[in-house]
Image (cartoon, rainbow, N blue to C red):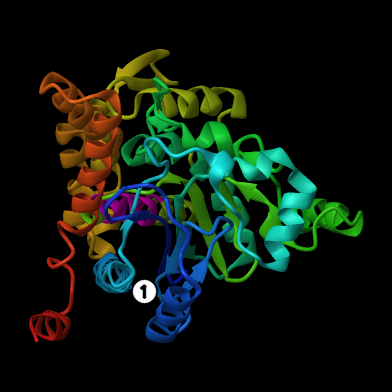
Amino acid sequence: MSYHRPSFTLGVEEEYLLVDQESLDLTAAPEEMMRQCTEELEGQVSPEFLQCQIEVGTRVCRTVADAGADLAHLRTKIARIAGQYGLAPLAVSCHPFADWHKQHYTDKQRYHELERDMGGVARRMLICGMHVHIGIDDDEARIDLMSQLPYFLPHLLALSTSSPYWKGDDTGLNAYRLTVFDNLPRTGLPPRFASWSEYKRSVQIIIDSGLIEDCTKIWWDLRPSDRFPTLESRICDISPRLDDTLAIVALTQSITHMLWRLRTKNQRWRIYDRFLIGENRWRAQRYGVSNGLIDYAKGEVVHFSELLEELIELVREDAEALECWDDVQAARRIVKQGTSADRQRSVHARAIAGGASAKEAQREVVRSLIAEYAEDLENHLPRTQHADQEN
């Protein structure tokens, strides 16, 4: 039996928070700034639920390198335009000390409906994420891979964790964002469907009941996109460093390709119960890469560094075919240096040790996040944009 090869193209969406450059507090994006972003970024930028947020999305990209160039372009433009209004963007899932009570949601019909339907749960959504679309243009293949990919979602989450703080408190979690997001309905690990038609029938029941208008209000950690022929991973925190983002994107693309490769050999990854995967999801949310996940075959917790080595070797053939082997290997650096959550805590601890107050230590964390947003962008910008920046 021959199998149609999907494109495995990439699309990456990132959500940023906007802070005042002086006070470092969250600040609503001025209307003129949003108009300027929309004009200069040609449909690749949009407002988010809260006025202090902004979302960008890459074009359809063939490789991780292409996605990196597009994201570097988007991040650079957003930072430049925001700077004209005294603002700075943060690529982080939770602001270290902001209070959601003080934020205002965007005046848009979709967001009015969300606030009406979800009440206080929606108003707490002061969180940002990173979504990765993988081009799978066969419906049945897309739903089949969606049943196998959840095994690896905790691995991706662990590498991305960037939300240890909430309203000025260290939550003890590396990804507090999911604690907030999981209060919404239709979130968490996706159900398992035997076929595309079963998925469509199940979703249509909720749509026909008038509870949602379309599949965009299904917010599972992994879902078929409603707008594109893609499988969309939504579990990850957003990473301040673009290099870390690209390592996670490369792993997502390579794992998906590996599972498709098994499918062409009439093989598949073992399906584990959501209960077991949920335990690893929690461990990733709690510890990031500093502890470990359950190896179900061994029946024991294995340190994340060991699991990552196994994963990198598992997808080597696929990463090489997709031209992202270097990016996949870069995930080792995240384990060695720590995730953003680990670095934020280190910045905070150093500030306290140096005599800073708790409030000033939190502001030091924000300053470090502003710096990390921009620190590796030039490595990915096309040469023409380097020249434009210099001029």
Q: Quadrant of residue 287?
A: top left
Image quadrant where one finds the C terminus: bottom left
Asked if residue 38 can be seen in this view, the reply is yes
Q: How many marks?
A: 1
Asked if residue 8 can be seen in this view, the reply is no
Magenta span has 251?
yes
Q: Position of residue 297 (x, y in %)?
A: 42, 20
| Residue beneath the point at 74% across and 44% down | 118
Which of 19/277 is in front?
19
Q: Position of residue 222 (x, y in %)?
A: 56, 48
| Residue beneath the point at 44% across and 76% down | 44
Relative horizontal placement of residue 228, taking residue 89 as reference (left or right): right
Relative horizontal placement of residue 154, taking residue 66 as reference (left or right): right
Which of 260/234 is in front?
234
| Residue beneath the point at 54% across and 51% down | 145
Specify the principal SS of the magenta part: helix
Mark 1 nearby-residue class (10 Å; few <14, some 14–19, many ≥20): many
Where disc 1 sits, the SS reads loop
Q: Position of residue 326 (x, y in %)?
A: 16, 55
Q: Quadrant of residue 285?
A: top left
Label 1 amino acid? Cys
Q: Position of residue 345 (x, y in %)?
A: 25, 28
Query: Which region shows up in magenta?
Result: 244-255
Which of 207/258 is in front?
207
- In the image, is residue 172 above or below residue 363? above
Magenta span has 119?
no
Relative horizontal placement of residue 50, taking residue 21 as reference (left or right): right
Q: Circle 1 is placed at which residue position?
A: 61
